[in-house]
Amino acid sequence: MNLMLSIDVEEWFQVENLRKAISKTQWNSLESRVEKNTLLILEILAALQQKATFFILGWIAQKIPDLIREISSQGHEIASHGFDHEPVFKLSREQFRKDLLLSRELLEKCSGQSIVGFRAPTFSMTGWGLDILQEEGFLYDSSYQPHRSKKNFSIAAISQANSNRVVLENGLLEILLSSHRWFGISLPWSGGGYFRLIPYPIFKKGIKNILREKGSYCFYIHPWELDPRQPKVPVSFLKKFKHYYGLSRTEEKFRALLQDFRFKTLQEALFSQAK
């Protein structure tokens, strides 16, 4: 069984649901909370002796390099989440390449690790983006989320996959975010808002079902999801629900998840599956 744990490291004000309310020109003037929240996650992981892959924005590495050094020093994998959380499909090919290389340079300088993994902001990867990842020497991508990524991925191997690991035609590996069929409906079951929304006993049962069916599972969470005291931004009811619902219970649920399951980094899982 391969259970993969990933942390998408970004500030609370960089998320897609708040994009229309907070512009990038405001970022430097807003309260930074990512270091405190990420250190809390590191504390939880250390206490429960778990390892994770941290997909980190280059913007964070540029602002708080000591945070990346601390994550790496504790034995976690460092991977790229792009530079400033711009969706891939909003960039040109050359803009994406520059974004990718800048992020990798900053993360490698801070961590001392070779950066081989990537997750697109808001799971926004495209087919041509995957080719650029392969051209630049990345080993894997983890940006395919059921129901959300299909319009951007035009690769039959991904849409027909029966496991969390797919070898693409260009040789790149794709680690899929997990989904689960519940009462005839296929739902994303990999973390984020669904983890906050669904009662933990039900979520836990879903993970066990996925493991029985596919033998692997990939989970993700953001540091801001463990921060119920973060500033409240006036946005639409739907976006407010998506971003703020369940924040007060996420830490407790996350601790329970790590007590019930043993996780690996994505890179560790890839190597163990290859054996």
Image: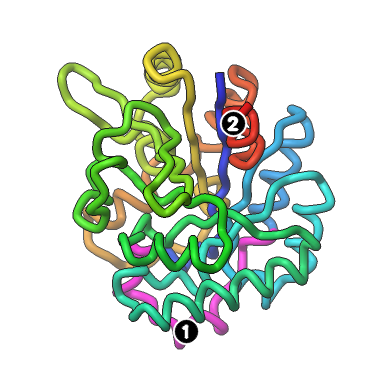
Callout 2–callout 1 Cβ contact below 8 Å: no
Give the x, y percent position of residue 16: 35, 64
The mark lying in front, picked from 2 and 1, is 2
Residue 18 in the magenta stretch? The answer is: yes
Tell me if mark 2 has few (under 14), some (14-19) or many (20+) residues whose alpha carbon lies within 10 angstroms of its own. Answer: few
Give the x, y percent position of residue 264: 64, 32
Q: Is residue 232 above or below residue 177?
A: below
Q: Quadrant of the C terminus?
A: top right
* Range shown magenta: 16-35
Left-right relation of 120 to 264: left
In space, the residues marked 2 and 1 are separated at their CA atoms by: 45 Å
Residue 26: mark:
1
Image quadrant where residue 158 sits? top left
Q: Hey, which residue is sitting farthest bottom in the picture?
A: 25
Residue at x-position 31% and y-position 50%: 242
Dot 2: what SS?
helix
Residue at x-position 30% and y-position 75%: 90
Residue at x-position 80% and y-position 62%: 112
Image quadrant where residue 44 sits? top right
Amino acid type at image mark 2: Ala
Amino acid type at image mark 1: Gln
Residue 17 in the magenta stretch? The answer is: yes
Q: Hey, which residue is sitting farthest right in the picture?
A: 73
Which sits in the foreground, 161 or 185? 161
Mark yes or no: residue 252 visible: no
Q: Quadrant of the N terminus?
A: top right
Residue 274: mark:
2
**Quick one: label 2 or label 1, which is nearer the N terminus?**
1
